[in-house]
Amino acid sequence: MWRRSGESVFGALVLLVLVVEAALLAFLTRGFALRLIGAIPSLRLEATVSWAVSTTALLLVVLVVYVIGYHHLSGIWQRRDLGQLQAWGETWVKVLHGDAPLPQGPLSGPAEEALLALREILHGDEGILLQDMLRDTGLAADLVKRLTSRFLVRRLVALEGLARARLLEAVDPLFVSLDGKEPAVRLLAARAIARTLGGLALGEPDEGRTLRFAASLRRAELPKGVVDEVLLLLEGRAKHLIRDLLRDPPASAALRRAALEALGRLALLDMLPIAAPALTDSDGEVRAAALRAILRIGYIPPDLLPRVAALLRDPLEFVRLHAARAINLVPGKTALDALVECLGDSSWYVRRSAAEALALRGPDGDAVLEEMSRTHEDRFARDMAAQVRADARAQAADRLSGGVRR
Amino acid sequence: MKAWNICLLLFQQGVLLYFASINLLYAFFAWRGLRAVTIYTRELSALALKDLLERDAYKPVSILVPAYNEQGSIVASVRSFLNLQFPQFEVIVVSDGSTDESVSRMVAAFALVEDDRLVRRAIEHRPELRSFRSLRHPNLTVVEKQNGGKADALNCALNYARFPIVCAVDADSMLDVEALLRATRLFVQDESVVAVGGTIRLLNGARLSQGRVSELRLPSRWIERFQVLEYARAFFTGRAGWSAAGALLIISGAFGLFRRDAVLLVGGYRPDTVGEDMELVMRLHRHFRERKLPYRVLSSPDPICWTEAPADMNTLRKQRNRWQRGLLEALWIHRVMFLNPRYGRLGMIAVPYFWIFEAFSPVVEVLGYVFLVVSFLVGDLFPEFALLFLLLAVLYGMLLSQLAAGIEMLLLSRYDRMRDRVLLFATGFIEFLGYRQLLTWERFVATFQVRAKHGKWGAMNRLGIPLEDHGTLAVAPPKNAPEPAPRPGKA
Amino acid sequence: MTSILVVDDDPAVTNVLKLFLESSGYAVVTAQGFVAGKKALESSLPDAIVLDLNMPDGLGLDLLSHLRVQLQRKTPVLVLSGNRQESTVLRALEMGANDFVRKPFSPREVTARLRKLLP
């Protein structure tokens, strides 16, 4: 979306403008004040103002020349880079297939980009060959070296390169970056590590790096959303991290919520028992996250059922809401009764949740809704039951008539 | 020196220092914003977006579209919203008592049927008359309600919204294909984000292809070209900088995303002001700061919204009149924040800045011109000064425009033709030959109309977005409508 | 010679598949993106198609449904996608795809699976 080069020079120019203008403002203010108390003659002040005018005009000229120059050059560079990128893309594929010799490093910008683009999409034998190509051309070592560059932007670009390269030997230097000060660096490092470890085949040994990652994440103070991402990127290996984040001593609430969310998204059914303590956690958001995980997986293990049922009376509205949806996973009359009770909840959202859950239970649920719309002692419950039932029937009729295109 | 001369000199100097300060501040924002963008683009790369999309890690969005008498463009607009590339979203169009064929055209185009949906009235608003859903697009809802103004229509849409993120747009906003993905990404990454503003750019003059902007060209009318620069200055320097400083006060009504629960928490939009977009953001700031809860309000450079800017002076003036009144109304409503340390950087820096350098800049500018004229009339006392001052002010303005244009040039999607680039530079100068003065006068007048026109919108002319692409936008202004009670218009 | 159409917006993918499939004896036509893919579908009759799902200018599933429903063709389709959601796989298969391979992929695996789909 933004051009990759030219920001720093322009940034320097903007800084120059800023500094010069600040200086001019200071001189002008001083000049005005002196003139006002009569300390300097009018001509002197006029000279100062004239200087201000010419300096500003000069700045403007410099800026315009730069803008027009950059515009012209960047257009040329863009076209040239595009052409080179295409050419290198084809070259690398030939090298991969054995039809061409391996070019020697150091590689140009488009060459690096094309090689990384190729590495990104392939795995298996070709993936291994590409890793070798990355090492043999020296690009792998270069990327790791750039991790310690003085310039923040170079480090960020190198981190993204390593995320695409997915080289196991780069993980250790990446751990160092993860402990760094800049939040952007930590974020990209976490992502790069996760992508690398996640790309390993399940049987492949990672020499304890996944566990080390868990420890680093606990320290790293990343936003919850980033941890969510990291867990998703880890794919099969996320299990170890999730287990670690949910065990004692417990990690922060945000990390536990991220772990629970990933547990649900990755549909890790066999790990549900580990989520059990979260159902009675002191933090309401963690309890809700545990319920959401159960919902995503679509199954409540029998020994967790009492805890889920208890959450139907949780003091927090959003917990009760999720509990109502979760209890719907259980067939049978007990669940039905529980939902009926939720129909009379004080919160509109919980009532709706319960009614929608009943509507999803088929003819039994529909019969109950119909009955509740007449006989429930709570007026709001009666209204909700009637409305949701009518809605559900309208939608069912639609589906039957094939009115929905997508 | 005589007392009168001292006064004159003082005022002239004051005006000049005032504009020099504005310029300095904007240059500062440009620098800060640019730095933030540099880091941000590396943080959120195409790779990261692709990863997220492939793993369904996004938050679903409800797009809220308030509309009033938009029959010429509403169908094309809604269609462009429905075609957005986003895994899960819904579009809620609220016709705020439209008296034209907006609703009937939508009924025909989208196979709408009346629907009696269950909705919780979390926020009060003027009653609905009918609500529809689409047989063809299950994620489209249309609501027809009694006229109550743009804020009122947005509140109605809020009630109907089902998803955790809401995106308030204008009926003629055209969102960039990836805009939603890039904007919601910020909510996904950080739970404390409550509002995100995108960048608004001009659709005028652009070539469209398959409903997307394929080439940017400077529009043919000078009045539109001036606006290209104005938007560039506002978004590439102003917003970016304030956002980087954590003190963003404005998120444009043409494209703003909010966490639905946060908006409901503070009570939705305020229907009695024309600056409802700014007022909501300020209210959000106050709510969280007063309770010392962690939160963030951001402006992001890359979710882009294309909007059709007014192409005739009348509509433009009414728009600017409304913007100025909106600004003053919002600032006044939240005047408690002024120089109040309880609100941190916002109260001590941002709010005073907006009072001094945005709200009252038309007054200062007009006074500046007045004193310029007076200087000449009074005699040959300080004509050289006056001229130099004027020259300096003009140069400042041009410098600022070039900074903004320079940042725009860094975008991949930019005005690519060299002649457009040169023309933009010329525009920065020609602005000062009347355009700027006219709008300053309009804003000046508006400052004194705040009381009288409280909460009122004006009639707008609209260029129609054609249903099919003919390469450029069609030009067919509809007739002027009379000016009744408050109703929504373009932002 | 058997012809294969590869539809993907990523030139790396089309480059790799073109070379590997051609060296296995197929004639390969590539289309960068949805629009190009649609045009290619309408103007030619490939014996098999490799289709990406997430393209910036249109969804692969839309192209698939266009092929199966509007064009009424039974050409074997192998869907190639980075999407990790099980529901996406199921949807693709429901809409008429014959096979599904995840990205990152092995070009030899794709070749082998294509060979199975072709007579």
Image (spheres, helix red, strand yellow):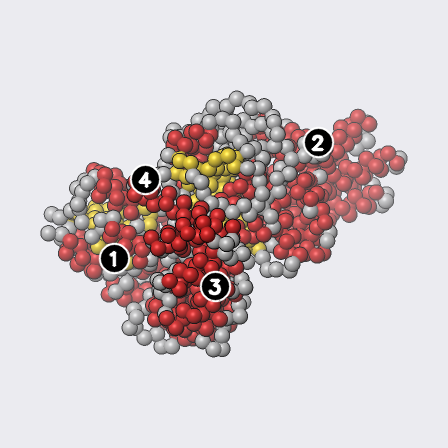
**Element type at marker 3?**
helix
**Front: mark 2 or 1:** 2
What mark, if any, has residue B338 been given in the picture?
none
User: Viewer-proximal residue, A201 or A154?
Assistant: A201
> What residue is drawn where x is 44% and y is 47%?
A386
Q: Give coordinates of residue A27: x percent, y percent.
A: 74, 47
The residues tagged by marks 3 and 1 sit, at their Cα atoms, a distance apart of 42 Å
**Considering only order in the chain, which callout, 4 or 3, is on the residue closer to the N terminus?**
3
> What residue is drawn where x is 27% and y is 51%?
C92
What mark, if any, has residue A403 been given in the picture?
4
The residues tagged by marks 2 and 1 sit, at their Cα atoms, a distance apart of 66 Å
Chain letter, disc 1 residue = C
Q: Is residue B254 above or below residue B241?
A: above
Please identify the quarter of the rendering in which residue A44 is found: top right
**Front: mark 3 or 4:** 3
The residues tagged by marks 4 and 2 sit, at their Cα atoms, a distance apart of 51 Å
Q: Residue B190: in sight, yes or no?
A: no
Q: Looking at the picture, which amino acid does disc 3 mark?
A: Leu
What mark, if any, has residue A312 been given in the picture?
3
Q: Is residue B349 above or below residue B413?
A: below
